[in-house]
Image: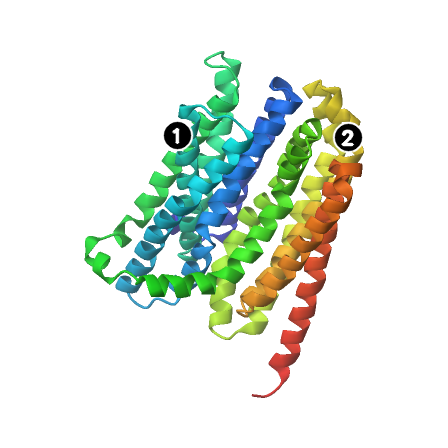
Amino acid sequence: MEILLKNSILNARTILFIIRGATLVSKFLLIVYMARKLSVVDLGLYGFITAAIFATVYIAGLEHGSITARQIINCKDFLCKQKTVFGLTIFTLIMFFLISPISYLFITSKVTLSLDMVILFFIIVYGESYSTEHKKILISLNQPVYSSVVDFIKSGVWAYLTVIFVSLNIFNLSIRNILFMWALSVIIGCFLVFIKLIKYYGMSVFATLPSIKTYGRQIYLTLPFFVTGISLIVFELSGRFSLQIINAQVEAGIYTLYSGFIFAIPLFVWSSSVAFDHSKILQAYENEEVSKSDSLIKVMLKRSLLICLFLVAFLYFFFDLLLILIEKIEYINYINDFYLFLLVPFFHIIDSHLYYMLYTRKRDKANALSSLAGVVFLFIFQYLTIDLYGITSVIFSIILALIISIVLKIFFIKKNMIAETIPQ
């Protein structure tokens, strides 16, 4: 696929945009359909379970795929790439066995799961973990379109099929059936990633896998990526956890619906804009073309903000019509909170692009520190205000936390630019 598009940047961008658009629409369609068919409380419960799954996937991955994606760009021969991919796969498997049982115990302390749902939970966690970390390698290997196709299959197709099957009365809409469709699509997505990387797997490299000490050092190097990434996860998922913890189950359901729209925007922007230029930005900086790397990031930021503005404007003018179709007064009563929530994608996108300017300079600790400062503020703000203001507290905490992260990233970027001008 990438070979066919190699000589046509416009076609590649267009196809990437269409694929991500179809994935985004599927997320919107599914969350609206669930909001219409499920009770507000059940939607909140679904949000809690999915939040736990995504948190588990991220913690298990430890952002090891990010450092692996950086390493594979510098590989000069096939054996190096083979060791890199195989090492990531083994690492992902080990972390799955270490982390997923802890997450399972956390979920079951709040929710009772049947045996089949437990099995689906573990399938989804490992499948998402494998595909998420290994897709980063595909992007570094200049496979952004294929990576987006995988995303569409494991994140979009099952959403469309679920709506169709329920509409045709093939099965009822329930959390169990939703998890089943999700697990099935994740398996297919993992298979597609595996097929693309299969040439890098071979028993010949098994004996040359990194030692435990080497893995430990790599985990240490990965920690800044992990802290930065888990911060974004906290920004997105904290409301699903905190509102459930204070037993604000109706507001938890409302937040699940709202956040399903809000955080789909940065995801779409990343895949349709950022993913395409990811490897070019890294290569420019690896070649010590700092100005070219910065220029690419600035162009990418402008393009991303324009896409974001279009999507936010659409939601601002038409979201209330969607709520009328859902026919539940609870969602309409909190519409002003949704309008406030629409600010989040802009700050999220600015923060992620500033992250790239530090990332290409290998200032990973600066990225981690700025994101961690935002998370600490978020926790403090929610702890002090969530009992009084509920969902409004969650939204304000996310906005203010992102602003803190942005300000600190700008400070570190300016500091680094000054250092770059000083002769060595």
Specify the farthest residue to the front: 109
Query: With 91 as the anchor, is 239 left or right in this view?
Result: right
314 and 360: which one is in front?
Answer: 360
Neighbour tally class for label 1: few under 14, some 14-19, many 20 plus, Cα within 10 Å: some
Judge by depth and name the residue closer to the eye, 140 or 175: 175
**Element marked by disc 1:** helix
Q: Which residue is mark 2?
A: 334
User: Residue at position x 61%, y 47% from top?
Assistant: 234
Q: Residue at x 50, y 60 (%)?
A: 223
Image check: 43 left or right of 63?
A: right
Q: Position of residue 413 (x, y in %)?
A: 65, 70
Which residue, as the protein is rendered here, is positioned at the far bottom? 423
Instruction: Residue 119: give its label.
Output: 1
Instruction: Give the residue type that dot 1 points to.
Output: Ile
Would you identify the image quadrant in which residue 64 lies?
bottom left
Colouring used for the render: rainbow
Nearest the viewer among 153 and 202 is: 202
Labelled pair 1, 2 in contact (Cβ < 8 Å): no
**Within 10 Å of the Cα at label 2, are there few (<14), some (14-19), or many (20+) other Cα atoms?**
some
